[in-house]
Image (cartoon, rainbow, N blue to C red):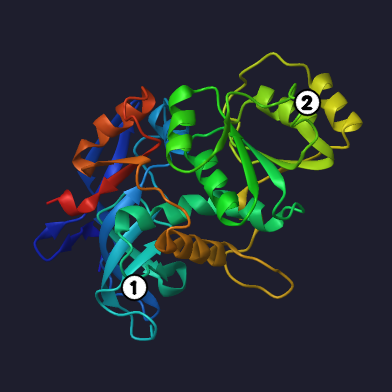
Amino acid sequence: MPNQLATYGSEIACAVTITGHQQAELLPVEEDLTPIGDKEVAGQTLATLVSAGTELNSAYLADSGFPKQLGYAAIFQINRVGAQVANLRKGDVVCAIGSHCSHQRKSASEVLQVPKGLSAEVAVFARMMGVSMTTLVTTLARPPAKILICGLGLVGHLAAKNFLAAGYQVYACDPVEFRRQMALETGIENVLERVPVDDPDLQGQFPLAVECSGHEQALLDAANTIRKGGEVVCIATPWRKLTDLALHDLHYAIFHNYAHIRSGWEWELPRHPQDFQHNNLFDNYTGALRWLHQGRVDVSNIYTKYNPADAQQAYQDLLHKRTGRLAVVFDWTKVG
């Protein structure tokens, strides 16, 4: 059967689509309506999470390459199950790497069942928690060590909570007051305005700094603040040059502080368990769902919900920092 306008009963599939520079719309989409594969599941989306840094910088603020469909964190309820799928059934709610679309279709191996009682709007954060969980499972620093989080946007905020849940002493810094206040109000106790490079009580106390801001000054300050031989792991994407710092300054810090600086890109891990690999992404996401369900990581006050039909308003509010929160969740139960 050729692609056609996707219909599910009386519903038409739709997706948040970037149609031009700073233009977002909820539009009908064409989708493959061939019979579901034996090892696939499909269903109706309940919630998706906006990754503000990636989606604003790579698409919403772009000048070309339209249309673009975004998103990589989705919760959906299964309504079709392939013949060879044994561990999932209609009605199950699952987590997936999925776009801002009203319906999802995935290999059964690429979804994780959401624990009973965990809401879709909270469960969707498991995917973003995974961004820093790669660093959590690969760092040489072990709890109860002091560690430093640089930047308290969504990625940094969740990184701080991940490391707290794992038993570390977490210090976190951000120059933006509302981010610091939100961190304090949601259980992150040691919150600073800037990297404590000149604080004699903290200088040299951190075997690990996790750089979540994408800012060159934060990277340099972290390299000068860690314990000799410590790690600085760069999680945030450096979207653009923000300073005129000389490379020599960082070179000097690396050499004299014996600093190990590396990428924290989550995809250094395999998606699924492999021989001779201790960790993988989907085990990380499973752990994140468990921590959310147990309340060890609390995200209840850090996001604002939007109807996907209001995507343009959501992206504008994120761009101009009008949400008063760190994250946006699209509530797909409001569509239709």
The residue positioned 38% from the left and 86% from the top of the image is 86
Q: Circle 1: is it few (<14), some (14-19), or many (20+) Cα within 10 Å?
A: many
* Relative side of 163 to 88, left or right: right
* Relative side of 18 to 109, left or right: left
Distance between the Cα atoms at labels 2 and 1?
A: 55 Å
Location of residue 46 in the rendering, given as x and y in whole percent from the top left corner: 26, 57
The residue positioned 80% from the left and 25% from the top of the image is 250
The residue positioned 70% from the left and 68% from the top of the image is 278
Query: Quick check: can you spot residue 35?
Result: no
Which corner quadrant of the image does residue 111 belong to? bottom left
80 or 278: nearer the eye? 278
Instruction: Name the residue furthest right.
Output: 256
Q: Secondary structure at mark 2?
A: loop
Image quadrant occupied by the N terminus = bottom left
78 or 255: nearer the eye? 255
Kind of residue sitting beneath label 1: Val
Location of residue 114 in the rendering, given as x and y in whole percent from the top left corner: 37, 67
Q: Which mark is residue 151?
A: none
233 or 51: nearer the eye? 233
* Relative side of 102 to 190, left or right: left
Which corner quadrant of the image does residue 251 belong to? top right
> Which residue was labeled with disc 2?
200
Q: How many marks?
A: 2
Location of residue 133 in the rendering, given as x and y in whole percent from the top left corner: 59, 54
Residue 171, above or below 221: below
Q: Earlier in the sequence, mark 2 or mark 1?
A: 1
> Which residue was labeled with disc 1?
41
Kind of residue sitting beneath label 2: Pro
The residue positioned 61% from the left and 19% from the top of the image is 242
